[in-house]
Image (cartoon, coloured by chain):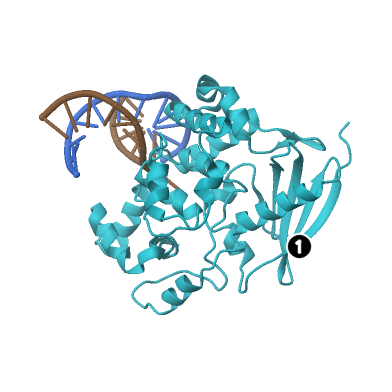
Chain colours: A cyan, B brown, C blue
Amino acid sequence: MASQPIPLRFAEPHPRPFNFPATVNSHGWVELAPFSWDQDRATLTRPIELDTGTLVELSLRPWRNSISGVASSARPLTAAERSLLSRATRRMLRLDEDLGAFTRLAAGRSDHTMRLAPGAGRILRCPSLFEDIVCVLCTTNIAWSGTRRMVSRLVEQLGTPLPHDPEKRAFPLPRAVAEAGPEFLRQQVGLGYRSEYVWGFAHKVAQGALDLAVLEASGRPTAELRAELLAIKGIGPYAAATILMLLGRYGHLPIDSAMRSFVGNKYYQGQTPSDEQIQAIYAPWGDWRYLAYWFDSG
DNA sequence: TTCCAGGGGTAGA
DNA sequence: TCTACCCATGGA
């Protein structure tokens, strides 16, 4: 018999303007397990396994000028765990990111038809950089349906269940993925040739050989971060640009089949553009290239 | 059956 | 630096 969860209510102030539904639906991440989005209630829900090992089901929705959160857990959370939840919430919704320069730049340009609603522009992230990077690895050379399938299986096979609702599982921590081994990831999760990449990454993080907090630290040159990302097996130019975007650095374009198709149709009369032609389209946006492309392609 | 997807690693030139 | 080839998987 599952125990009754203990709810903890909290609020996180958000910048203004802030568009909660637009942020949640800014890209496909919300469709990946274990995210769940209730459009009618404008509520984002997901289980999270905190670094302390505590399982929490977190629900977020907008309320007045803040994000209202409910965290349900089997036992009362410590002050440190409440701090971890606050950090995860702010990370997911990018509540501390300053997009003022981008929105001013977008407002001043008439040559791009941007679909940027007021308060939009923040692209949803996972609670941790580890989960973000694993999901990016699951987007390479595969259709979106395949990405969804692989991430769902990762959660089903390796995620820790919520004590009060065992049907729901958190995204696995690095140690769980590392201990599963590449063959398990290949056979049971269906990661295919990506299994070695995902396992190798998780193993390094679990062993402490790769410190994600260092990657996430502000103030480091983007070129340096990009070089470190490209040194991880399985991460090439597309994945590095996507991860840099998830780190709040928008100066690199993730050139993939979708971008080639969109840019070709919109700017090159349906012809497939070269990488250089794609770069030329968004070069005027400088450090905001990624966001310019993203909200150009809608 | 064949192609290819929100690519990337490796070998060889 | 560039190109060719290979890598699993499952929709279309």
Image position, residue C1 (x, y; %): 19, 44
Q: Is residue A256 above or below residue A189?
A: below
Q: Which residue is mark 1?
A: A11
For disc 1, the chain is A
Q: Is residue A278 above or below residue A243?
A: below
Q: Is residue A101 above or below residue A30?
A: below
Is residue A213 shown left or right of residue A163?
left
The answer to whether residue A21 is visible is: yes
Is the residue marked by circle 1 packed among few (<14), some (14-19), or many (20+) residues within 10 Å? some
Q: Residue at x 71, y 43 (%)?
A: A47
In the structure shown, which secondary structural element does the residue marked by tag 1 occupy?
strand
Q: Residue at x 49, y 33 (%)?
A: A201
Q: How many marks?
A: 1
Image position, residue A200 (x, y; %): 48, 29
Is residue A157 shown left or right of residue A5?
left
Image position, residue A280 (x, y; %): 26, 62
Instruction: Indicate the amino acid at tag 1.
Output: Ala
Locate the N terminus of chain A and report the quarter of the image it occupies: top right
Q: Residue at x 57, y 27 (%)?
A: A178
Camera-side residue of A170 and B5: A170
The answer to whether residue A271 is visible is: no
Camera-side residue of B6 and A14: A14
Is residue A65 shown left or right of residue A268?
right
Image position, residue A168 (x, y; %): 72, 38
Q: Residue at x 41, y 43 (%)?
A: A228
